[in-house]
Amino acid sequence: MSFNISLSGLSAMQKALDVTSNNIANVATTGFKASRAEFADVYTTSVMSNSRTTVGSGVQTAVISQQFAQGSIESTNNTLDLAISGEGFFVLNAEDSQENIYTRAGNFEIDENGNVITSSGYYLQVYDVNEDGTVKSMSLDSTRNLVIPAKAGSVHVSGFNPQSGDPCQGRFSNPDLQDYLQHESECQQYCYIKFESKF
């Protein structure tokens, strides 16, 4: 009996080491959430036993739980590397699938059709919005693939400097990201910028 109790302890500690090893192995995995091994006592009971004098039968792994504490956010050179601060998940969907997938990993890329996808090919889902920017529906059934157009049509850029109150504005035809960045640098420093796209 004592031998089996000791073996259960060794088995539990091996499980704890396995969990720790997995956490260390995934230290550079984007969006990875560490796990923790949680244990519970094992009791042997019978009709003739006295609960006040019954010796436990060892330990067992109750659950391997994920820890959803906020991780560190690092800057990268990829404009599609996103991070969530606080609670929440990115919603993904496989092609021709009605089932959503949830992740904290925000390392996205663009496919040949302009869809924002993961390295595994899952599509990032977003809500449709009205012309004033309000969300049409908050239902997950109403989400769609996020598509980045090659050109944005005619875009009016406006803003203001919160320190001086002076306006900064401009208009571009068929702009790309470089146009945005160039105009923003030409605006007065620390301008709040508002983009209004018209296709």
Image (cartoon, rainbow, N blue to C red):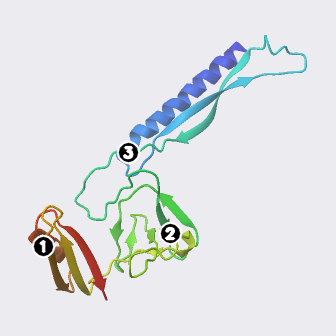
- Residue type, numbered disc 3: Gly
Q: Is residue 171 left or right of residue 39?
A: left
Residue found at the far front of this picture: 165
Residue closer to the observer: 81 or 197: 197
The local crowd at label 2, few if under 14, some if 14 to 19, many if 20 or more residues have their Cα within 10 Å, is many
Question: Quarter-wise, where is residue 132 in the image?
Answer: bottom left
SS of the residue under disc 2: strand
> Can see residue 177?
no
The location of residue 138, given as percent across then percent down, is: 52, 70
- For the residues marked 1 and 3, what is the alpha-carbon distance in whole angstroms? 33 Å
Residue corresponding to mark 2 = 93
Q: In the rendering, at what x and y percent does residue 102 appear?
A: 50, 59
Q: Quadrant of residue 140?
A: bottom right
Residue 162 appears in the rendering: yes
Asked if 1 appears above or below 74 in the picture, the reply is above
Q: Earlier in the sequence, mark 1 or mark 2?
A: 2
Q: Secondary structure at mark 3?
A: loop
Q: Which residue is mark 1?
A: 182
> Which residue does the numbered mark 3 point to in the structure image?
71
